[in-house]
Image (cartoon, rainbow, N blue to C red):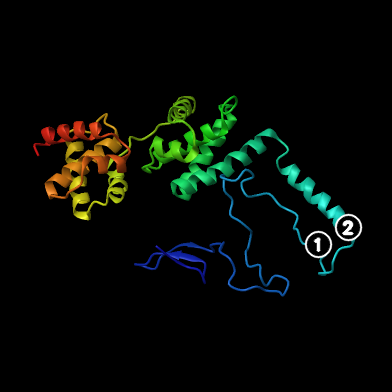
Amino acid sequence: MRSDSSRGEVYCSKCGFVVHEKTVETAPEWRSFSNEEKDERSRTGLPTSIAMHDMGLATTIGGENRDAAGKSLSGSMKSSMERMRTWDRRSQVHESADRNLRQAFSELRRLSEKLAVSEAVTEKAAYIYRKALERSLVRGRSITMILAASLYAACRDRDVPRTLKDVAAASNVKKKDIARSYRLLVKEMDMKMPVVNPARCVTKIASKAKVSEKTQRRALQILLKAEEARVSAGKDPMGLSASAIYVACTLEGENITQRDIAEAAGVTEVTIRNRYKGLRSALGI
């Protein structure tokens, strides 16, 4: 499928069949149409997002003290406009739920940047937190704690390799508190969380431990065989991935110690040794 912005059509690149026509262009303008708007090329402002407390639909009174003709306002009118701006800001968060969401989503942006997750994960975390707020699961609990649990649940749902330890370090909340809140969200909201694929964690660990690309591919092959042999069932994905990388390092002759891999994966050396023995015996390596 290809799109033609000049015609507003979406068509098939092979046969030329027009799938959709008269599409609305939402990108910024390439040019302005008047002198007053020479620096303003946006069509409708910011896109809507559930990761904003007002979903990006609120209007604000501009801060420029000029009238429609471009003339400066009088002193009395300036003070009146300032009072209007103050009440406009207050009216947007006049309920406790709005204040809660504003604080929570400000924290969500900070956590998302620290964990380097995509916008889709951020939106999913905001959706989970809104549902938790509707069901009064936030009442009596820390906003940051429930928000961190929502973000971890979003990472699990989108298959993004972020562990509880990563989220706890970014949010400054204890790991056990986030785990408790996560279990509460899953139980009360009847969420079905997919099982984490250990192969997703290989790249993250290998980049920190500075493992070669050839060894990474070998580790992925080992994890695939372990999944086929049902050895990976019930095992911690991060520990299993770290052990697979260590097995691959020994087979490829790469000099990486258990301690280096354990520090990169955030697990103990004992975990790697136990999973290492299990993988070699089960796969006959």
Q: Is residue 129 visible?
A: yes
- Residue 51 in the figure: left or right of residue 40: left
Seen from the viewer's position, the closer of residues 62 and 42 is: 62
Give how far apart the Cα atoms at labels 2 and 1 are. Answer: 9 Å
**Quarter of image, res 277:** top left
Q: Percent from the top left, x then y, of residue 189?
A: 49, 28
State the residue lying farthest toward the left.
284
Disc 2 on helix, strand or loop? Answer: helix
Q: Look at the image and tell me in which quarter the C terminus lies.
A: top left
Q: Which residue, given by chain and number where applicable, does mark 2 sit on? A: 77
**Quarter of image, res 134:** top right
Three-letter code for the amino acid on which mark 2 is drawn: Met
Q: Percent from the top left, x then y, of residue 281?
A: 11, 33
Q: Which residue, given by chain and number where applicable, does mark 1 sit on? A: 65
Q: Percent from the top left, x then y, of residue 60?
A: 72, 53
Rendered residue at 75%/42% (across/down): 91
Rendered residue at 62%/64% (across/down): 42
In the depicted structure, whether residue 133 falls above or below residue 52: above
Disc 1 on helix, strand or loop? Answer: loop
Q: Residues within 10 Å of mark 2 (few under 14, many from 20)?
A: few
In the depicted structure, whether residue 193 falls above or below residue 210: above
Contact (Cβ within 8 Å) of mark 2 with mark 1: yes
Q: Point out which mark residue 184 bears.
A: none
